[in-house]
Image (spheres, grey):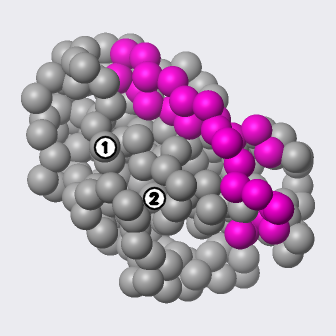
Amino acid sequence: MRSTRWAALVAAGTLMLSGCAEGGNTAARDTSPQSPVGAGATAPVTGAAGAPEEGAGPSPAAKMVCDPEIRERIAQILALPDPPQPGSTWSQGLFSCLYRLPTGTLTLSVQESASPAAARINFESVKERRGPMKDIEGLANLGFPAAQSSTGTVAFVKDSFTLTADATGLSEPVGPHGITRTALAYQVATDVLACWSDG
């Protein structure tokens, strides 16, 4: 509980100070045919409600989960000598970024939906599949629908995107400060939200 509060304070500071290379303002994104994007290491829900049609590829905002700023932030949190080099996939609208780290895997994914309402439906689906997940309340949710599991998954909805950070593939405690998987997932997810807000 204490590490989650600490992570919320760190995230709030990060949102104010962070800068990201690509424009990521999700509110201004083009919702022309793209695809849905599901959650973490779990298979996506195909044909998710309100999912746009398959298009040319993920939006710049979705691809931010693999951007240098996020890689550098992961290296900083975990005190890695170099930023990790992730692999990414785009399938049926699901953009996933898999980080193979010294103590396991971290997966960041974005589900693109046709509308904010459809994104909220996808978010509820993520909560059911990854459950049990508790809603993140108060300042820690940063004003967005958000939920977390005790095992290392965090999900947020912003505009027509559902962001999932899945740290369940990492051994605990995580990093030099001995944080939980959930605290790591929360920190990285809020860094992505900061990138989206920067654009």
Q: Label 1 sits on what residue type?
A: Pro
Residue 133 versus residue 175: which sits nearer the camera? Answer: 175
Q: Is residue 61 magenta?
A: no
Q: CA distance from mark 1 to mark 2?
A: 12 Å
Q: Secondary structure at mark 1?
A: helix
Task: Magenta stretch: give its range.
Answer: 76-101
Q: Give the residue number, with chain letter if any, for mark 2.
A: 192
Callout 2 amino acid: Val
For label 1, count other residues whose C-alpha is less than 10 Å away and answer few (under 14), some (14-19) or many (20+).
some
The residue at the point 72 percent across, 76 percent down is 3
Q: Is residue 12 visible?
A: no
Mark 2 residue crowding within 10 angstroms, few (<14) / some (14–19) / many (20+): many
Does the residue at mark 1 contact the one at mark 2 (Cβ under 8 Å)? Answer: no
Residue drawn 52% across the image and 45% down it? 66
- Report the side of 181 relative to 147 (left or right): right
Coordinates of residue 67 in the picture (x, y in percent) = 49, 50
* x then y, percent, for residue 40: 57, 35
Observer-nearest of 88 and 96: 88
Residue 84 is covered by the magenta coloring: yes
118, above or below 171, in the image: above
Query: Which of the 4 image quarters holds residue 144?
Result: bottom left
Q: Position of residue 166 (x, y in %)?
A: 63, 43
First along the sequence among labels 1 and 2:
1
x 10%, y 29%: residue: 32
Instruction: Give the side of residue 22 with respect to residue 104, left or right.
Output: left
Q: Residue at x 40, y 83 (%)?
A: 16
Write down the residue under mark 1. 60
Split into 4 quadrants, where in the image is the N terminus? Answer: bottom right
Q: Which quarter of the figure is the C terminus placed in?
A: bottom left
The answer to whether residue 112 is visible is yes
Mark on residue 137?
none
